[in-house]
Image: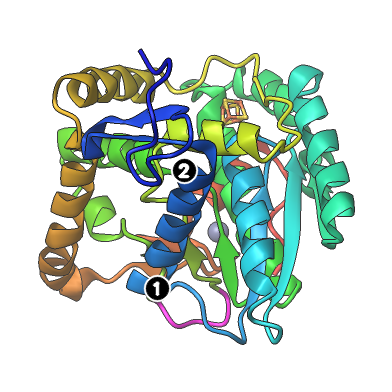
Amino acid sequence: MMEGTLCSRCKRRKAIIEIRYLNERLCRECFVSFFEKRVRRTIRRYELLDPKDVVAVALSGGKDSMVLLHILKKLSKKAPRSKLFAIIIDEGIGGPRRKGIEGAMSFCDDLGIEYHLYTFKEELGLDINGIMERASKLKNPMPACSYCGVFRRQLLNQKARELGATKLATGHNLDDECQTALMNFIRGDVSRIARAGAVVGVIKDPLFVPKIKPLRESPEEEIQVYAELSSLPVLGSACPYAGDAFRKQMREILSRLERRYPGTRYQLLGSVDNLIPLLSMREEGEKPRLCEVCGEITSGEECKSCAMRRELGLRPADL
Ligand code: SF4
Ligand code: ZN
């Protein structure tokens, strides 16, 4: 279908990608510039970065975080006072996931970016397989992704803080944001919708490092194409644990909708952004607090991660 089609923008070069929600076909050069411009616009629009920020990038070795690091590195050349480094968490899943982590480390070396690697095994006392073994003895064990996601989030916040980061950048993309929004709508989780958005953590507290999502307006399939065109060493980060089944359903629903009604994802993201200020006002009285043990956001005294550590008999988080 793209064969022989010329780029809608430069009208000279061969188009390599169709952007259906814009009804445009772009060549390699115009796509790369369109993609990077949109990330810069996201950063500007939501005021994600300050020229003096110390930015920690949560790097998994998957395409999203590798693209994020690549672009932030490019941008950092224009903001010499900013500092950028990566935090890599190895959950101990092994196999292809381990290859992703090795890819992430050598990518940092290639870019000349300092990175810090932490493992579940060292930080929690058990890797994810050990955690699942322990969880299987509980009365109501949770799926691997619940433990994995919660522990990773806690470690990222803790390490970013210890390393002096003023922002923690994550690779959440447009699809992740829309899936999360739908899940929260269906579950009626108003507090979580109120806490969504380009910056997570309006709480000013030295224990909490605000999280920013510069790729939240970038569709997943375009991140993939950008990673390939930029020859980023994305080795895949497949995980033998099944992943979140509910999220997978949301993903299917959203791709069906997007195919049929291009632009649906942006509309959904726009709706969430419009709702956030209204919901935050409603939530005003019950502002999220920070966990007394580790500094993560929590609605009670203890955060989910610290509660899970306790249930599983793991060592408590250090402050
Ligand atoms: Fe962790 Fe689940 Fe992701 Fe595997 S799929 S790395 S268990 S969150
Ligand atoms: Zn905690």
**Image quarter hosting the C terminus:** bottom right
Q: Is residue 310 visible?
A: no
Q: Is residue 201 above or below residue 241?
A: below
Q: Residues within 10 Å of mark 2 (few under 14, many from 20)?
A: many
Magenta residue span: 203-207
Q: Amino acid at mark 2?
A: Phe
Indicate the position of residue 102 as horizontal and vertical percent values: 85, 35
State which mark lies toward you, 1 or 2: 2
Indicate the position of residue 96 as horizontal and vertical percent values: 76, 19
- Name the image quarter holding residue 288: bottom left
- 122 or 225, nearer to the observer: 225
Residue 157 belongs to magenta span: no
For label 2, the residue is: 31
Q: Main secondary structure of the magenta part?
A: loop
- 17 or 132, nearer to the observer: 17
- 262 or 107, nearer to the observer: 262
Secondary structure at badge 1 equals helix
